[in-house]
Image (cartoon, grey):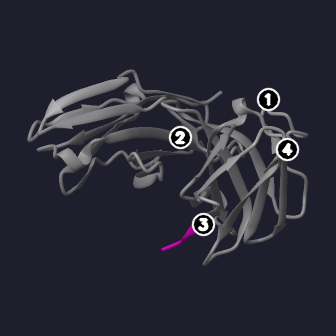
Amino acid sequence: GAVVSQHPSRVICKSGTSVKIECRSLDFQATTMFWYRQFPKKSLMLMATSNEGSKATYEQGVEKDKFLINHASLTLSTLTVTSAHPEDSSFYICSARILGSGVYNEQFFGPGTRLTVL
Amino acid sequence: AQKVTQAQTEISVVEKEDVTLDCVYETRDTTYYLFWYKQPPSGELVFLIRRNSFDEQNEISGRYSWNFQKSTSSFNFTITASQVVDSAVYFCALSEAGTGRRALTFGSGTRLQVQP
């Protein structure tokens, strides 16, 4: 089956530093990847839609300069949390949509990255 | 706009009891997909089922069954003879095919605790 990996799985950083999270589709190509954020005991909220070769589309209320998204290839999207602060501590999950899945919209989730900002 | 409502925040049952998790959705699209995911404490989402809007057949997979009713915009999930390993947060989600919004919209989740 289709596999999506995320790296790192867990990261602890100091306030003010930047953190990069990678999302890779291991055995399929993905034109579109989605980044979700989940606070403790809350639901998953879409942050942005990442399309290969173009700028990401951010949901309302998500700062694009704070959460930089790059989708450089059909198998890799990265989310960089810039100048992280404790309120950015969260669980970040990506999903990758299979190239050519059309309206069938087949997509798979990564295992998530738990970010803790001290 | 699309919306998914899981009114049950937390459910606690004793092992071997049957439990139904409710999901009600809203969409203006005629073509859409509904999902259920399980999220254990590890955080990783475990895919359980995907159903498209044109397929109202109920589905059974082992102890799991799903009841899709377009008339009431509901997609309920039943676990028969629950086990401790079923303890997790369960999310219902929706994606629309016609509007071009490919991301999933999640409900708020239902935390299921199965007591031994």
Residue labelled with disc 1: A60
Neighbour tally class for label 4: few under 14, some 14-19, many 20 plus, Cα within 10 Å: some
- CB atoms at circles 2 and 4 under 8 Å apart? no
Cα–Cα gap, marks 2 and 1: 19 Å
- CB atoms at circles 2 and 1 under 8 Å apart? no
Of the image marks 3 and 4, the number of the one nearer the N terminus:
3
Residue labelled with disc 2: B94
**How many marks are shown on the rendered structure?**
4
State whether discs 1 and 3 lie on one chain: yes
The dominant secondary structure in magenta is: loop
- Tell me where residue A7 sits by quadrant: bottom right
Q: Is residue A4 magenta?
A: yes
Q: Position of residue B70 (x, y in %)?
A: 41, 34
Q: Position of residue A83 (x, y in %)?
A: 85, 40
- Circle 3 sits in a helix, a strand or a loop, which is it? strand
Horizontal side of A59 relative to B76 (left or right) equals: right
Identify which residue, A5 or B36, lies in the foreground. A5
- Circle 1 sits in a helix, a strand or a loop, which is it? loop
Instruction: Give, as a three-letter code, the residue at label 4.
Output: Thr
Cα–Cα gap, marks 1 and 3: 27 Å
Of badges 3 and 4, the one in the foreground is 4
- Residue A82, numbered circle: 4
- Circle 4 sits in a helix, a strand or a loop, which is it? loop
The residue range painted magenta reads A1-5
Cα–Cα gap, marks 2 and 4: 31 Å
Q: Can residue B65 be seen by looking at this rendering?
A: no
Residue labelled with disc 3: A5
**Mark 2 falls within which chain?**
B
